[in-house]
Image: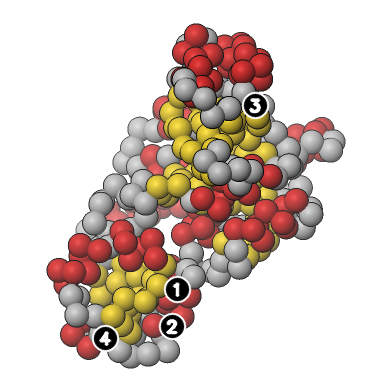
């Protein structure tokens, strides 16, 4: 037994040596490419998406696709850092799902910037104090994040990426006995997403909405009779015990985040374009507005309406379509839309989220 273990461990050591050599070679190539790019952005979402898709097509297992992407995002992040440590703003504090989304997309943050609001994320990126921002835009259970849509409408920033983050809520507390809990803190959306579980397991407990799940864990850490609904990372940060895991009512619960920046993105081969547009409030106007998409065989994946704030009962429609704005079909559809819409803004074209 000992001899067999020794043999396999020696093989692993030899493989690790090869991995280190190859990663170092990759880093050297990345550094050379960085010197050739001049003033172009260091982070290229379309290129990284292409790399990850190619690797997933070749993934033989036993590692999951999620594990493979996590490993190679970390490698790419460290290679980028040889040129510059990117600063990424997100809705803080540490332990929020926004931080998880930022880490997932960028493979680790050299210079994370915790923000008190989504507005602050936009302001820091617009002012050049952060290279990128990560903001929530919709949840599969609760729907769109209205504040993010409103800020996209008035901002000069472009959407340059998206992140789909499976959200698993956990009950966290200082103690280990659920019967001692008298209050549960969490963000209002998380409380809603765990409503059935809470009614079945903690029916007489007070539910208190707070600004973030990370804030909920901080409050729970100060009170033995309180608990928080948050991520495991948030619990680790504040030293809380895990009382119950994955308590969300819908196991498919996912939040979509957008990456915002002051530059656009080249085609990756599997892209999405986000638009904001409005029309005159007359019968059939919306159908007529969407017609150019069908006429050019462009698939629409999302349609969301928001008050325009310019007049009563006037709305802006947020639309996601398949393809990049430079694709022939998409470009033709956008050209026609410009003539039909009273307002049209391309929010960005970007790679479809990779696992």
Crowding at dot 1, Cα within 10 Å, few <14 / some 14-19 / many 20+, comes out as some
> In what element is the residue under mark 1?
strand
Q: Earlier in the sequence, mark 3 or mark 1?
A: 1
Location of mark 3 (residue): 342
The residue shown at (76%, 47%) is: 83
Q: Position of residue 147 (x, y in %)?
A: 55, 53
Image depth: mark 3 or mark 2 in front: 3
Which residue lies under the disc numbered 1? 210
Q: Nearer the viewer, residue 4 or 253?
A: 253
> In which image quadrant can residue 258 be found?
top right
Look at the numbered disc 2 and give the secondary structure of its residue.
helix
Observer-side mark, 2 or 1, equals: 1
* In front of the other: 275 or 163: 275
- Nearer-N-terminus badge (3/2): 2
- The picture quadrant where one finds residue 64 is top left
User: What residue is disc 4 on?
Assistant: 182
Q: Which mark is residue 219?
A: 2
* Vertical relation: 355 (above or below) 114: above
Query: Is the C-beta separation of discs 2 and 1 under 8 Å?
Result: yes
């Amino acid at each position: 037994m000992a001899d067999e273990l020794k043999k396999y461990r020696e093989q692993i050591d030899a493989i690790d040596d090869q991995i280190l050599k190859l990663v170092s070679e990759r880093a050297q190539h990345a550094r050379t490419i960085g010197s050739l790019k001049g003033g172009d952005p260091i982070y290229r979402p379309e290129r990284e998406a292409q790399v990850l898709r190619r690797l997933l097509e070749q993934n033989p297992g036993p590692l999951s696709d999620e594990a493979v992407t996590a490993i190679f995002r970390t490698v790419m992040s460290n290679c980028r850092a040889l040129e510059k440590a990117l600063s990424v703003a997100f809705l803080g504090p540490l332990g929020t799902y926004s931080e998880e989304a930022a880490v997932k997309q960028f493979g680790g943050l050299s210079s994370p910037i915790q923000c008190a609001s989504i507005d602050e994320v936009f302001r820091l990126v617009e002012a050049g104090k952060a290279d990128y921002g990560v903001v929530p835009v919709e949840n599969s259970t609760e729907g769109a994040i209205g504040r993010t849509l409103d800020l996209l409408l008035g901002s000069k920033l472009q959407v340059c990426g998206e992140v789909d983050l499976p959200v698993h809520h956990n009950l966290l507390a200082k103690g280990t006995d659920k019967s001692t809990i008298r209050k549960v803190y969490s963000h209002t959306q998380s409380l809603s997403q765990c409503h059935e579980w809470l009614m079945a397991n903690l029916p007489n407990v007070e539910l208190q909405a707070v600004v973030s799940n990370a804030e909920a864990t901080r409050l729970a850490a100060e009170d033995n009779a309180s608990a928080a609904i948050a991520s495991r990372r948030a619990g680790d940060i504040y030293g809380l015990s895990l009382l119950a895991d994955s308590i969300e009512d819908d196991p498919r619960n996912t939040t979509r985040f957008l990456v915002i920046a002051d530059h656009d993105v080249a085609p990756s081969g599997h892209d999405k374009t986000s638009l904001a547009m409005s029309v005159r409030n007359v019968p059939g106007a919306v159908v007529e507005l969407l017609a150019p998409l069908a006429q050019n065989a462009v698939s629409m994946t999302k349609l969301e309406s928001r008050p325009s704030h310019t007049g009563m009962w006037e709305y802006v429609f947020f639309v996601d379509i398949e393809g990049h704005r430079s694709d022939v079909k998409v470009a033709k559809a956008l050209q026609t839309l410009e003539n039909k819409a009273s307002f049209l803004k391309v929010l960005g074209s970007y790679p479809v989220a990779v696992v």
